[in-house]
Image (cartoon, rainbow, N blue to C red):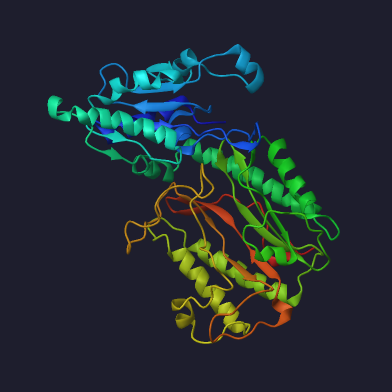
Amino acid sequence: MGIEQKEYRQRQQEVMSKIGGGTAIFRSAPLATMHNDVEYTYRQESSFYYLTGFNEPEAVAVFAPHHKEHQYILFVQPKDPEKETWTGYRCGVEAAKEIYGADEAYPIAELNEKLPQYLVNADRIYYHLGSEDCFNNIVIAHWLKLMRGYQRRGQAPLAIEDTRPLTFPMRLVKSPGEIAMMRQATKISAMAHNRAREFARPGVYEYQVQAEIEHIFRKEGGIGIAYPSIVASGENACILHYIENDRQIQDNELLLIDAGCSYGYYNGDITRTFPVSGKFTPEQKALYEIVLEAQLKAIAEVQPGKPYNEFHDIAVCVIVQGLLDLGLLQGDLEEIIQEEKYKPFYMHRTGHWLGLDVHDVGTYKHNEEAWRNLQPGHILTVEPGIYISPFIKPAEGQPEIPDRWKGIGIRIEDDLLVTADGHDILTADVPKSVAEMER
């Protein structure tokens, strides 16, 4: 399973149709160092991978539709048997053309020499000024050199434009091939969550549950975690991005697991919260039912043509009303929402785009006022929650929280594909009803 070469070619053609007489430059992700000379497992920059499928560092992709001979050019590391013995096989220059369909390929060391021919007749340069100052300076230096000849030649790339508006809208709407990859990523993620719920019990450590989850990811063909797994017992569940996972799980606690598998760089993202002893306490059950209702009603709002914010707004309404009913908030529902007095309990949005990046690219708004409408091919998460930290500070004018509620954190998250007539819950294989969460 994977993206076929013809789809990469279609993506490249779409980018080139957008830039017209310009030249676009994309840089691979750098190697990241764990400590001293030990490197992290390499992870390609997502837009570079989206356009090329090429998964090595020290690479540059150039798209120059105006060039007479070469429209798609790759600069890559050359073959080097001695270095490959230490750090792994390289594709090399010739295979960059044969395997990845480049019209021309060069060793990366020749970038400064060969790049100008693809810039000289461009009306602008498309490049994202990222965090690598060294490479930023290379692109800017070439641009400035061409601009110095503008008066004499009457032609030069008059601007540098960001590449993100080129690729982000493309990446936001998933192709059939991408949807297949996402289905596999979420399928494996679901299997891991179900195994974790079978395994978890009082007395085990959070990291032992984490090990069960991540074992499934690799066993079933994933390349690993989509993000650091969150296995949060008791009051740790009130920390949104808790990743220490070193506490022993106690009787009568909830366990919040937020974990997803990466499959071919496409990611799952699931959260479930359940009682490790098999039964909710009354307080846990009351809050869980509110979060579940909020999620179910939010999911119902995920429909093509609906503004992105509607599923969040309905989740907030359900959560605020539930907290009012329990006496944890007081006052007028609309006023509480308007003044955001619910935020000590629910401080994040109800979802995000999902794809090659866990918090995937693509705008949520067209402008300050107008939200983007959902459309078929969008994939997003729906993840409401309630968190009552032991250190919670209610908003002004709101009641103090009785101790019996403190330390309870609950989140329920699923991944949804927007379809032509509604939505498809990609993570439906993971139970979430009260009856299914108890045992």
Q: Residue at x 66, y 48 (%)?
A: 190
* Residue found 67% across the figure and 50% down from its top: 229
Q: Is residue 173 visible?
A: no
Residue 113 placed where, x, y %? 35, 18
Compared to residue 375, the image places residue 395 above or below, namely below
The image quarter containing residue 173 is top left
Q: Position of residue 226 (x, y in %)?
A: 60, 44
Q: Is residue 431 left or right of residue 143?
A: right
**300 or 8, which lies in front?**
8
Among all residues in the image, which is located at the extreme right? 203
Q: Quadrant of the C terminus?
A: bottom right
- Give residue 175's position: percent from left, percent from top: 44, 39
Q: Residue at x 71, y 47 (%)?
A: 192
Q: Give coordinates of residue 359: x percent, y percent.
A: 51, 50
The answer to whether 18 appears left or right of 427 in the picture is: left
Q: Quadrant of residue 158?
A: top left
Classify the position of the N terminus by image quarter: top right
Question: With 114 as the anchor, is 387 left or right in this view?
Answer: right
Query: Eyeballing the image, is 291 above or below 371?
Result: below
Q: Quadrant of residue 147?
A: top left
Count of marks placed on residues:
0
Residue 159 visible here: yes
275 vs 31: above or below: below
